[in-house]
Every structure is written in structure tokens, then in C-alpha cells.
Image: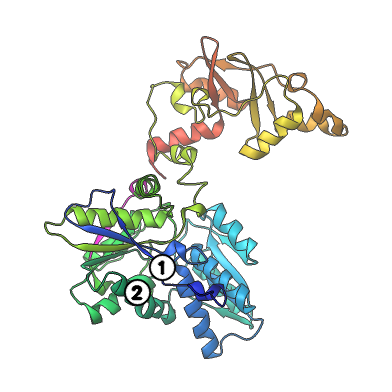
Amino acid sequence: MAPFGNVLDMIGDTPMVALGSFETGPCGLFVKLENQNPGGSIKDRTALAMVDAAERAGDLRPGGRLIEATAGNTGLGLALVASQKGYRLTVVVPDKMSQEKIFHLRAMGAEVVMTRSDVGKGHPDYYHDTAIRLAEKDENACFVNQFSNPANVLAHEEGTGPEIWRQMEHDVDAVVCGVGTGGTLTGLGRFFARTAPEVEMVLADPEGSVLVDYLRTGAIGKAGSWLVEGIGEDFVPDICDLSLVGRGFTIPDREAFAVARDLLGREGILAGSSSGTLIAAALRYCRAQTERKRVVTFVCDSGNKYLSKMFNDYWMLDHGFLDRPRHGDLRDLISRPHAEHAAVVLAPDDTLLTAYGRMKLYDISQLPVLGDESVMGIIDESDLLLAVYGRERAFGDQVRDHMVRDLTILDPGAPIEALLPIFARNQVAVIEDDGRFLGLITKIDLLNHLRRKVVPGL
């Protein structure tokens, strides 16, 4: 392969891979690896197409500013394009976005404006409305507006669609897409309607989104909430043509995350959360068939943007997406069981510097100090601060000299109500069974437990 002229020339022509380890009924299932684009997602295609179109239309001047509302990946694609073409970029993102995406955007020089994810279109804090407001205030800004931008559709109608048709040797029966803006679904739908009208377009939608119900009823219902990023909507985007869709599947977060994790374990493909939704829907479609079909879907982006979320067992447990054995007592509230080597602990002769390092590394504010199998004390960030303020050399002191020894230790059989007076004293509950440390229970552990009982997976 000859060298590319620059990183933007690497966008597109992504590989297609057959999935061989999943049960697909009589069908063959293929995924197009859009995570192999230089910015890590399918949105590199639309970002480049939309910026090129804005340049041709004269909407972008040298050194100008791009503004966009994005679930993350369009922002990353725009950041890649902007950095190469010399434009400034402001991205407006809802606050459910993964930290990895936000860090990535900022590392590429984008200004990130975070807004609420619990409000809908028309609310002043909705991310799309916020982006419009920012663009109206800056006469040198170009509002990209992926939700209404025809270049978004053309990127897939003229690029992605022909690639799939060529790679599959003109033998495709169904294509499974999600909808963030509708650009991929509409562009591919138009291409196949013209080139191979027998190809069925299938919608994969997170549970909580309104799009599958709209497809069935023609009415927009009340949106719920979902944690999968990048797809699903509480409205039908302007460029989204659902008349091209033959059927749709609603996929719960739990199923999407499980499939994405299985994809890594079985196929070695590190994919994002929306890819889990798409592949889960494709699997449902394949298993419902009675004759062999060739089905294509996408790995929309890389899972390295979700390592702190769906690939983090503790995040999955906190949200009720993974199951532990249930005991019916306080052990069920311990999020980091010591028996699983999940609890972060100290030894009494560790230094305060070691305590500080572990607090920073694991983003926690208190650490139990263990002697043999039981807890000798606890040290938290307040203890640490009081110990070293004005005498920085105290970072070399042993933890035993500054830990709190006045602890409340509960048996796992104690009632949940026994936690409340401990929390009222701003302490954590130490759970031990016959002198053997089981773990800590904090306020957030109890809140997670109560929330899962009412709204599992929220």
C-alpha cells in the first residue's frame, strides 16, 4: 500500500469481517470495522464530508470556527478534520458522554461545552439547542448541524454504501443500522434502494428511544433513558428517512453491553456501546430467519472510549448489568468485595504517600487499613490533609500513626437500617464476618442498591 498524503486520506475503505463465533441461525453476519478510521469511528466520514461541503458553499473562512452538537464521535471526527484544515472547533455534548471521549476531544484542541442529558429537544439546555445558540452569537462560526446536513447522508450514499456492495461482492440481503442523526441509515437506504432494492434496511434502536415505535405507529411517544452512546433519539432527525426501513428492533442497554463485551471476548474486536446495540439487533434478525441471508452491520467506533464504562466490571455492577451471587444480607451492598481482591486496602506500615497514590489512582476518598484479616482503622482524604498540611515530610509517615481507629463494624446479617446512623456521622460501614474483613459500604453503595430495586439499569 502506497503512503497516504495525510491522515484525512485514510478515512473510508474500512475492512469487512465475518463473525463466526455467534449463533446466527441460518445467516452469515458481517461487520464493517468503522473503528479503523483514523479518528476511530464512522463519523470521520461525515465530518470530512460536511466540512468539505461547507468550504464549497463558502460558509467556512480560513481560521473559522466550527460548532456542533454531538454524542462524541462526530466531534472527534470534526476535531480530526479541523486540526488538519486549520479551523477552531466547539463541540456541545450531553453529560452522559464517557470521560475518554471528552479527554480525547480536548486533547485534539476542541473546546467542549457540556450540557444536560435529561432534557429533550426544545429545552434551552438540550445539547442541540445549546449549539444553535452558540453559533448565533458568533458571526465567524459555522454550525455544522449534522442532524439536518445533506452532506451527512451523501457521505454514506456515495461512500459507505458502494464500499459495502463491493466488499460483499454484490451479495447482501440486509443491513442493520442505528440512528443518531439518520445519516448512515438514510444514505445506505437510498444507495441500496437504487442499486439493489431487495436489500432490507433494519433499524437497531436503544430501549428508551422513540424511533422503533414511530416506525410502527407513525407517532412520536415519550422518550425514556438509555446509556448506550451515539444512537437513539427522542425525535426524528430531519435527514432520517424511516420509510426506507423494513423492520426495527428495540435493544435494552443490558443486552447491548453484553454483546459488545462478548464481541471482544469471542472475536477480539474492541467495539463501542452502539456497536453492541447494532450487533444485538442483527443477531435477533438472523435468528428469526428460515433461510440463509447475508447480513451486514457496523462496529461504529472503538471500545477504547468506553473502558471506564461497559468494559469496567464495577461500573456494570453498579448499574445492575452484571450479576453477583445474592446473599440476602449486607454483602449484597458491598461494591468491592475483599474476597474478590476488589477492595483497595493499606497495610499499617504503608506511608501516607502510598495512601495518597492509591486514592488518586482509584478515585476513592477512604481506605481501610488491614492487619491480618480484620480492619485496624480507616484513613480518608481529610485525615491525610490534616497530617501533611504545613509539614509535607509527613507523607513519609506510616499510615498507622494517622488512621482513625474508632470504627463501626457490622455483621453481614445486620439490617440495612443500621447503616443510616453510620452515614449520619459521615463514616463508612465496615463489614466483617467473625473478624474477617468483607468490604466497605458507603453512601453511594446504598444509593446504588436502592436505585437498582426501583429502576434496574438506570
Measured as percent of width and height from the top left, residue 369 is found at 65, 21
Q: 41 above or below 369? A: below
**Residue closest to the eye, 19 or 273:** 19
Measured as percent of width and height from the top left, residue 149 is found at 44, 79
Q: Which mark is residue 391?
A: none
Q: 137 above or below 454? A: below
Measured as percent of width and height from the top left, residue 414 is found at 47, 16
**Residue closest to the eye, 244 or 34:** 34
Q: CA distance from mark 2 to mark 1?
A: 8 Å
Q: Disc 2 residue type?
A: Glu
Residue carrying label 2 = 163
Q: Residue at x 49, y 51 (%)?
A: 306
**Residue closest to the eye, 435 or 410:** 435
Magenta residues (range): 247-255
Contact between marks 2 and 1 (CB within 8 A): the answer is yes
Question: Does residue 196 appear to the left or right of 446 in the view shown?
Answer: left
Question: Does residue 354 appear to the left or right of 277 in the view shown?
Answer: right
